[in-house]
Image (spheres, rainbow, N blue to C red):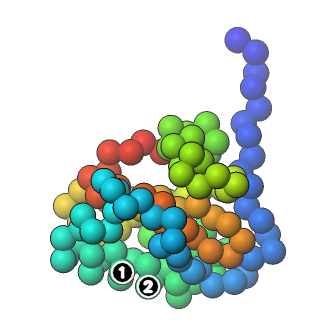
Amino acid sequence: MAFKPRETLQEPPHYLEKEVRFSFSRCDTGKYCIRGLENDELRRFYQTMGHLENHTWKQARGLPREKGISLDTKSGDAYEMLKLRMDGCSTFGHFRVDGTDANMRVFVGLHKDLAYIILIDREGKIQH
């Protein structure tokens, strides 16, 4: 088997010093929608977003993976699914929501200085 170099992640450096901001304009309105969250999950979801918004992109990327934003590789299972939902975006990531029964993850597309929320995986079933 020939050696295949790992693809590098694209992380535009020009907005690493800007504060993390989110948009719901690309969020799934079906199965992976915010409407499917229970009150406690919704509260923790917004607490987690608020925590991340208190950081710059560089700081959020430097946090432990349970507390920050992790970038997804192009070879990951979720990448193609996310790419289909947000064409024109080449960098995707996710963050975890603390305190929920399941390993809830929120998948985002990074474009300019916004994290567009694409999918809310309430049960932690989507592999990244």
Task: Assess disc 2: are there few (<14), some (14-19) or many (≥20) residues with their C-alpha within 10 Å of its C-alpha.
Answer: some
Q: Secondary structure at mark 2?
A: helix
Tell me the tag on residue 46.
1
Taking depth in this image into account, of 70 and 43 the one nearest to the observer is 43
Residue lying at 75% horizontally and 76% vertically, measured from the top left: 15
The answer to which of 61 and 27 lies nearer the viewer is: 27
Residue 109 seen anywhere in this rendered image of the structure: yes
Amino acid type at circle 2 is Gly
Q: Of residues 11 and 79, which is closer to you in this image?
A: 79
Q: Position of residue 10 (x, y in %)?
A: 74, 55
Q: Amino acid at mark 1?
A: Tyr
Quadrant housing the N terminus: top right
Mark number, residue 24:
none
* Residue visible at 41% across and 59% down in the picture: 28
Indicate whether 52 appears above or below 120: below
- Measuring from the top left, give residue 42's x and y in whole percent: 27, 75
Q: Outermost residue, bottom direction?
A: 54
- In-image side of 123 versus 2 (left or right): left
Residue 110 placed where, x, y %? 63, 64
The reply, left or right, for residue 92 in relation to residue 39 is right
Q: Secondary structure at mark 1?
A: helix
Residue 59 appears in the figure: no
The quadrant in which residue 40 appears is bottom left
Residue 111 drawn at (x, y percent): 67, 66
Q: Residue furthest right?
A: 14
57 vs 96, left or right, is right
Residue drawn at the location 72% of the way across and 36% of the way down: 6
Left or right side of 66 for 69? right
User: Which residue is the site of mark 2?
Assistant: 50
